[in-house]
Amino acid sequence: MAGIVVVLDFDKTIIECDSDNWVVDELGFTDLFNQLLPTMPWNTLMDTMMMELHANGKTIDEIVKVLQRIPIHPRVVPAIKTAYAMGCDLRIVSDANTLFIDTILKNLGIRECFSEINTNPSYITEEGRLRVLPYHDSNKSHHGCSLCPPNMCKGLIIERIQDSITCGEEKKRFIYLGDGSGDYCPSLRLKEKDFMMPRKNFPVWELICKDPLLVKAEIHEWSDGEDMERILLHLINKISMEEFISADCKRQSFSVSSHESLPHVLPVRQ
Ligand SMILES: [Mg+2]
Ligand SMILES: [Zn+2]
């Protein structure tokens, strides 16, 4: 269904854990991470942790190998492949970074399912250290959203996607999936005909539960990958049927008004 945009968070939505924590923990740097956590923003902390990893002889290869065995629910990849095969436009909005996400998606064989990955840029220096930069450079100009961390406002990204695809007459419908507090801001930007899928008992779900009326989109909670697959594919089918029926109504009313001799009884679709 080309009229549907599925926007997914990455950590704890597509994969089961947080990729940043996974790399730090698996390479044995949890204590240092916890020690530095109160002293700087998360995005800066990850860049610092990558410097520490490099200083302690950990290579990009070791990071990649750790990323390749990250846990994922067995139904998530089939759900993404089916949504893509049904013609949905799949995009990622994540506070991880390009190297982590690319590595994991390529390893799972689903990189080509996504038309866009919005995340913090990362690159490898000549010395072999991974640098992680902020998505929005807050030194240049602050994004102005009080709900979001300085490096990324996912709501602004959703707004940009909404603007970029509603230039035509056809309105695309959004389905947004996420778990974290950073997924709350974009949930407030969704429209009446959109769908919000917060992960049950996770921060975004708790924030939405405080005042569900603030979210205009229809809310469908999910708990695990099996749930996610079932609900996501159900919503895609539901939207497809609605769009098909409304397109069919337009065709029928057009043909009735322009052909006076049409039979009075129109066939009823079963
Ligand atoms: Mg997340
Ligand atoms: Zn925001």
Image: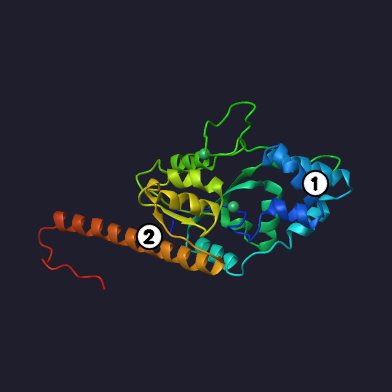
Q: Hey, which residue is sitting farthest right in the picture? A: 57
Kind of residue indicated by mark 2? Ile
Note whether ligand 1 is within 8 Å of mark 2.
Answer: no
* Residue occupied by mark 1: 32
Spatial CA distance of label 2 from label 1 is 47 Å
Name the secondary structure under disc 2.
helix
Q: Quadrant of the C terminus?
A: bottom left
Q: Position of residue 85 (x, y in %)?
A: 51, 64
Q: Mark 1 Cα within 10 Å, few/some/many (few <14, many 20+)?
A: few
Mark 1: which secondary structure?
helix
Which residue is depicted at the point 54% across and 42% down? Answer: 154
Q: Earlier in the sequence, mark 2 or mark 1?
A: 1
Beta carbon at label 1 within 8 Å of ligand 1: no
**What residue sits right under mark 2 in the picture?**
239
Residue 102 visible in the displayed image = no
Q: Is residue 78 above or below residue 9?
A: below
Question: x and y percent of residue 98 in the render?
Answer: 68, 47
Q: Nearer the viewer, mark 2 or mark 1?
A: 1
Quadrant of the drawing holding the N terminus: bottom left
Q: Give the residue drawn at x 63%, y 32%.
A: 137
The amino acid at mark 1 is Leu
Q: Is residue 137 left or right of residue 270?
A: right
Q: Tell me where residue 145 appears, x and y as whole percent.
A: 52, 34
- Characterize the local packing of mark 2: few (<14), some (14-19) or many (20 or more) Cα atoms within 10 angstroms: some
Disc on res. 100: none
Query: In percent of the image, x 81 and y 40: which residue is there?
Result: 125
Viewer-closest of 194 and 42: 42
Q: Is any part of residue 50 visible from this angle?
A: yes
Q: Residue furthest top?
A: 140
* Frontmost residue, 29 versus 127: 29
